[in-house]
Each structure stands twice: as C-alpha cells, then as structure tokens.
Image (cartoon, rainbow, N blue to C red):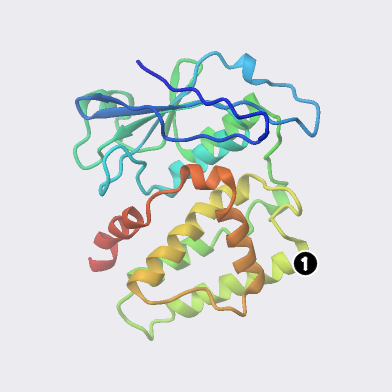
Amino acid sequence: MSTVKITPSPASLTTTIKHLACIQQPRLQSTIFTNKFRTPRRALTVSMASVDTPFEVCVKQSITTPNKLGDCPFTQRVLLTLEEKQLPYDMKFVDLSNKPDWFLKISPEGKVPLIKLDEKWVPDSDVITQALEEKFPEPPLATPPEKASVGLKIFPKFVAFVKSKDPSDGTEQALLDELTAFNDYLKENGPFINGNDVSATDLSLGPKLYHLEIALGYYKNWSVPDSFSYVKSYMKSIFSRESFINTRALKEDVIEGWRPKVMG
C-alpha cells in the first residue's frame, strides 16, 4: 500500500488533509489521510503518537467522479468526527450499486459507514461516533443530553418536502416550522448547538443541511429564507470548517443521490 503523508509548513499550524493517495483493486479503492495536532488549547489525553495506523472506514464511492467520496451524510458525520479529533483514517470506497463480496462479508446489510475499531468492524454512525468519543475523549465533542435533540426533525421534514409532488400538502410549511424553531434556538444559544464549541450534534446536522441546501435548490428552486439569519450563519460556519471541506460530497453526487427519491 502506498501512502502520502502531509506535514504542515511551519507557517501553518492547522491540519490540511487532502485526497493524495489512492489504491486501486477490483471494486475497491482506498485513500489514506494523515494529520498532526495543532497546538492544543487544553491538556490532551490522546495524541497522534498513540494511533499507530489509520482507521479503516468503508464509505460510499462517488457515482459521478472516480476516486471521490460519495454523498452519504451519515458517513460524512463519521469522517467529520475523525477530522475534528485529528485522527488518521483510510477511506475504502465501496460501489453501493455493485457491492463487492469482501464488503458484504464484513457488512451483511451492505450499509456504510463502517469502521474498524479494535479489530472489529462497527456499523452505524451513532454507534461509531459514540465509540470514538469514548476512546478518544479529547477534544471533547459530546453534546449535553438536553441539547442532543436540537434540530433533529429538520432532516425528515426536508426529505418529505423534497420528495413531495403536491405543493399544497404542507411539507414545505412543516420544514419551515422546524427551521423557525432552530433559528430561535440559535438566536438564544448559538452560534453552535452547544454554544461556542462545535459538538457531535453539529457534526450530525451539518451534512444533512448541506444535502438540504443542494437538493432543494436543484429540485425545487428553494433555499432557506433570509429571515432565518441565524440558521444561514450556522450553515455558513459549518460548511466553511476545514473538516467539512475535507469530507463533503461533490454537489453533483448529492443531486444524483437524491434523484431516485425525488423522481420516484
């Protein structure tokens, strides 16, 4: 396996992770991401030196561009967690339209994301991110229980609206109601769900809002109203984070990923 490691220049203390190494096998490609910690703000209990090898993560392969990450928001949530905790990872691209035998052996349900932790393959973004938080508690990303459900209903309301073919069925208003509640919450508690610090709930909601913005813009010519200024500022802040830029799907993949659901 060939890898490319990136060492930040002295002038930059922030981590830069690029898609710089690929391995091509039958129906499998993998890219290794490595990074180094910036100067810590708080005492760390885990350091990069304690992680000997990158975490193997099975991810959806792009359906529009070879050797690129696909459009799964749940996978991006896992990758964001790894990025924010500055842990190295090795992405293994899986063609979900033609799942290879090696993948089905470790994921009988054929779903991503999937990560190898302590020599065991672990599915489900909820389980994975919780395990990473417990194993690597610094920097902390856990959201206080009373805030963990903030924004939770936005994604299902978006799904209902983007799939709707009846403009009078109330799905748009249902989404607007959830965005109103979220905007009010951010106004009083923001800029992020847990105040000034990004938390696990932001890393879950951010990719879903990214899909919302692209899919509704393309299929419904719809965007988040300007009156929701706190929501729009929140989206801008999340989308501009280096970790998000490193792990986001191509716009074309998001559009194509939603096409079967929208077109029915």
- Measured as percent of width and height from the top left, residue 17 is found at 51, 34
Q: Amino acid at mark 1?
A: Glu
Q: Secondary structure at mark 1?
A: helix
> Which quarter of the figure has residue 44?
top right
Q: Is residue 135 above or below residue 235?
A: above
Q: Relative to the observer, which residue lies in front, 158 or 196?
A: 196
Q: Residues within 10 Å of mark 1 (few under 14, many from 20)?
A: few
Q: Position of residue 69 (x, y in %)?
A: 37, 41
Q: Nearer the viewer, residue 30 or 258?
A: 30
Q: Is residue 136 left or right of residue 116?
A: right
Whether residue 178 is situated above or below residue 142 in the rendered picture: below
Look at the image and tell me in which quarter the N terminus lies.
Answer: top left
Mark 1 — residue? 188
Q: How many marks?
A: 1
Q: From what the image shows, is residue 111 above or below residue 196? A: above
Q: Residue at x 49, y 52 (%)?
A: 207
Residue at 61% from the left image edge and 51% from the top image edge: 202
Q: Pinpoint residue 45: horizontal percent, then vertical percent.
A: 74, 22
Q: In the figure, is residue 161 to the left or right of 153?
A: left
| Residue lying at 67% horizontally and 20% vertically, measured from the top left | 47
Query: Where residue 210 sits: x, y (%)?
Result: 48, 58
Q: Where on the picture, by quarter, is residue 138?
A: top right
x 80%, y 31%: residue: 42
As drawn, is 187 to the left or to the right of 229?
right
Residue lying at the far bottom of the rendered structure = 168
Looking at the rendered image, the quarter that the C terminus falls into is: bottom left
